Amino acid sequence: MSEDYRIRFLVIDDEHSIRKLCVTIGNSLGFVSAQVESAEAALAYIDAQAPDLVLADLKLANMDGLEFLEKLKRAHPRTEVAMMTGHGSIESAVQAMKLGAYDFITKPFRIEELKLVLQRMAEKIRLVSENEFLRERVTTEMELSGIIGSSAKIQDVLRMVARLKNTRTPVLITGESGTGKELVARAIHFRGSLAQRPFVAVDCGALVPTLIESELFGYERGAFTGALKPKDGLFQAANGGTLFLDEIGELPLEMQTKLLRALQEKEVRRVGSNVRTQVDVRIVAATNRDLEQAYREGTFRKDLYFRLNVVAVHLPALRERRSDIPSLVHFFLDKYVPDGTLQVSNAAMKALLQYDWPGNVRELQNCIERAVALGNRELIDVYDLPPALRGAAAMSVGSPTAMAADVALQDTSDRGNAGKIFTPAVTPNDLEALERITIQRVFDQVKGDKTIAGKMLGISRATLYRKIKRYQIKAASTSA
């Protein structure tokens, strides 16, 4: 097993024989073990290496063991510590426990006794790490459910995720801002064989230009003003897993060269060091820019472009998959109002369908969150939507998009219903096709549940039955 995934163990004692024995025991348990003889040396080591387990003598030369424990737990609360002493007492044990010690062992100790304590500490570390992973996994799965839609374009994206999840192939995700590029990157990582390895995301556009290299590759102590101790970079943090480089097109040309070298040689060099460190990361990059055009203009390295663009995944803009808007709206409603009591009026849904969504799914989510916050918690109507949507809806009456929205929501027999908006024009064949496709996709998504389908489409149950019969719509389940 690589050292990156083994328990890191530090022994602190002024007796060499004790340190040697404890290190031997730690090594026998599969730990990566180290030893120091003083509290000062231990604190310096811990700041640089961050061990998982610490075994410290209560009687240290220049610093009391309890003082050391307090300082350690304040700076590194997740590090598990056991104290040992040849002068044990109940008072010392109680005080150590109050300060955060995991256990207390008295010298001379039996080897099996120490092994048992260390094994319990290691098991706690593993359980904490596993719980954190599971929480992140659950959170991620919830986030992945945000890739909502049954349109052909979004289904193509999900099929591509399924193909890529168990490979280490570099992936370039393209699409406008707000389309969900990081969501797809997380899906590729957490649904595949690397799911238990690190996923590190970095927004290249948000990095300070002068600090990009140190952020990506790390730095040594004294490499620049403020570098008080060595630090690993994001490449090392992602070692064994996935490094997601968002907005890769914003990297300066000089950094593009260094990034390319790191990808080709699979090694990094900290700023201020001549030592190269091997790294094994899968690269997933994303951009809302046209990188092919950028390299033709000389603002992006051609060789880096081809290095990243082994497999490309393009995310469609929301306006290119309008049939997914009702599903997304109800997904966000369920997120902000879980009890399912809040509904969307036909007029509001029509406005949502007509709008071009320059901010894509992110803008739609913000729109629904705003409407929930400002509305009456019973019905979202047009006046609960942002001014841009209300204005666009008013200006687009009679446009093809407005007609398509009408067709998706209305039936000619509903002209007299309150709240219904009907465009009194002969419906073209292509608009009928859009209506049929929209209803079929929603019907498939809810597995034939007509009640839910009617709510998602914003039409009455009777109207839905007529349209199902008219278009001969079928689903795997036809529950009433």
Image: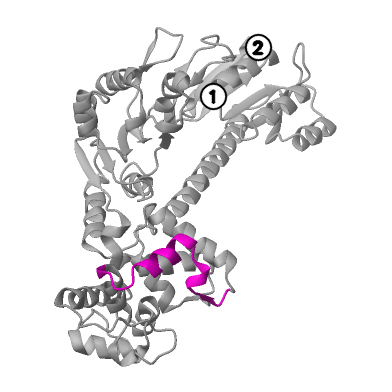
> Which corner quadrant of the image does residue 377 belong to?
bottom right
Q: Nearer the viewer, residue 337 or 406?
A: 406
Q: Looking at this view, name the residue that lies furthest to the top.
A: 274
Q: Nearer the viewer, residue 236 or 3?
A: 236
**Side (left or right) of 51 relative to 189:** right
In the image, residue 311 sits, relative to residue 211, either above or below, namely below
**Side (left or right) of 112 relative to 146:** right
- Asked whether residue 77 appears in the rendered view, the answer is yes
Residue shown at the point (65%, 12%) measured from the top left: 37
**What distance separates the C-alpha of mark 2 from that of mark 1?**
17 Å
The magenta stretch is: 377-400
Amino acid type at circle 2 is Glu
Q: Is residue 384 magenta?
A: yes
Choose mark 2 or mark 1, whichever is in front.
2
Q: Residues within 10 Å of mark 2 (few under 14, many from 20)?
A: some
Which residue bears the numbered disc 1? Answer: 25
- Tell me the element at label 2: loop
